[in-house]
Amino acid sequence: MKKLAPGALRTNLLIVILLQAVLYSGLWLWDEYVASYFTLILPGIILAILLLSTISDFIEPSRIPGWYYWIMFVSILTPLIVGALFYSLYGGQLDWLVFSG
């Protein structure tokens, strides 16, 4: 695997953060029910993949590049931050959580 220059890594991480932020924001604006599930489930799945790849890399060193771990870490944090932002923008009142009975 090719090693990225530090400037290229920062640029790629910024692109990934912005792309994910736009996609998750669009999802939150489209349907907060689906967005809240994506915001809670996808980071958990990505965290499990990250933990498994880290454990397997410790057991048998592989050629997984360092930027892979950074992108996985960013992919865990970005939806959680966007979800917290939209949750606070909605004042903690998500339509699907409000009991109307």
Image (tube, rainbow, N blue to C red):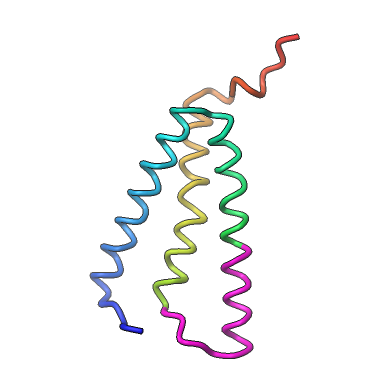
Does the magenta stretch mainly form a helix, a strand or a loop?
Answer: helix
Q: Residue furthest bottom?
A: 60
Q: Position of residue 14 (x, y in %)?
A: 31, 57
Quarter occupied by the N terminus = bottom left
Q: Position of residue 68 (x, y in %)?
A: 44, 71
Which residue occupies 57% across, 53% down? 43
Q: Residue furthest right?
A: 101
The magenta-colored residue range is: 48-65
Residues 18 and 84: in front is 18
Residue 60 belongs to the span the image colors magenta:
yes
The answer to whether 90 is drawn above or below residue 5 in the figure is above
Judge left or right: residue 70 versus residue 50.
Answer: left
Q: Quadrant of residue 21?
A: top left
Quarter occupied by the C terminus = top right
Residue 52 belongs to the span the image colors magenta:
yes
Which residue occupies 49% across, 46% down? 79
Q: Quadrant of residue 6?
A: bottom left
Count of numbered badges drawn on the protein: 0
The answer to whether 87 is drawn above or below residue 19 in the figure is above
Residues 63 and 18: in front is 63
Which residue occupies 45% across, 58% down? 74
Which residue occupies 47% across, 71% down? 69
Residues 67 and 88: in front is 67
